[in-house]
Amino acid sequence: VSQFKGNQETATNKTETQKVYRVLGVNADGSAELELVIEWVRMKADCGGGGLPVEFDSKAPGANTQAKFADVYKNIGKPQANLLCAPTGKVIKVKEMSLVTPAAAGSQSIKLTDMTGRDDFNFLTVFPEEPIKVGKTWIEKSEIKVTVEDKLKETIQLQRKYTLDSVQGNVATVSFKTSVLTPVKNP
């Protein structure tokens, strides 16, 4: 909600994406190289005020002709990041890829930025270093930043308790429960 001189406007935005992590290879030490690719994006923005909402679906016919979403469309199907994951599942190195100025014949050159240490890239279940048996639990603590007001952010401590429920062939079933450790008074 935005207000200016007594006027109020409510804007809503919604974005859905389908991301795929492709395994590029597994190293001798058990670490794996992954590549993040965005396969599909659907976006909707409604600025209120009676105007029509703006919509974009990368799978829709003519999506490549929507000028407002040209930068989004040209990233569909292209690598967004390369990740190196430890055998436990922990992301240990991230190289974010970004498209730079178009080169000759419309091709895109790619620039890599090292994003190592960013917790938001730890998306896999991280297993303990030692072997675990069915029924065994382990705990992972992490932090997230939440927006409290406009530009004010607060760090919240989380704890996730994992349980190895079963193993059938090469498939392990893991359940987890997340608890908020930081006292939060603001709803």
Image: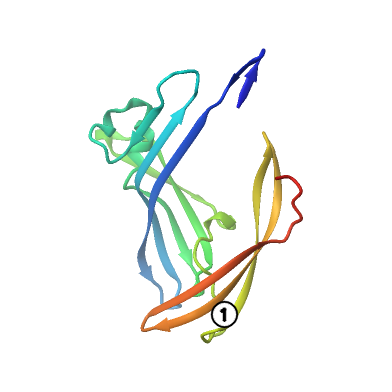
Determine which quarter of the picture holds residue 99. top left
**Crowding near the residue tagged with mark 1, few <14, some 14–19, many ≥20 C-alpha atoms within 10 Å:** few
**Percent of width and height locating residue 161:** 61, 71
Q: Residue at x 43, y 19 (%)?
A: 51
Q: Residue at x 53, y 68 (%)?
A: 90
Q: Residue at x 66, y 14 (%)?
A: 6
Quadrant showing the C terminus: top right
Q: Amino acid at mark 1?
A: Glu
**Percent of width and height locating residue 62:** 24, 31
**From this viewpoint, which residue is outermost toward the top?**
5
Q: Residue at x 63, y 73 (%)?
A: 139
Q: Secondary structure at mark 1?
A: loop
Question: Eyeballing the image, is 139 above or below 72?
Answer: below
Q: What's the image's color scheme?
A: rainbow
Q: Nearer the viewer, residue 18 or 134?
A: 134
Q: Nearer the viewer, residue 34 or 157?
A: 157
Count numbered badges in the picture: 1
Question: Eyeballing the image, is 56 above or below 153?
Answer: above
**Percent of width and height locating residue 126:** 54, 70
Q: Is residue 117 left or right of residue 19?
A: right
Question: Eyeballing the image, is 145 above or below 83?
Answer: above
Q: Is residue 135 left or right of residue 101?
A: right
**Percent of width and height locating residue 181:** 72, 61
Question: Eyeballing the image, is 91 above or below 100?
Answer: below
Q: Would you name the residue on which mark 1 appears?
A: 129
Quadrant showing the N terminus: top right
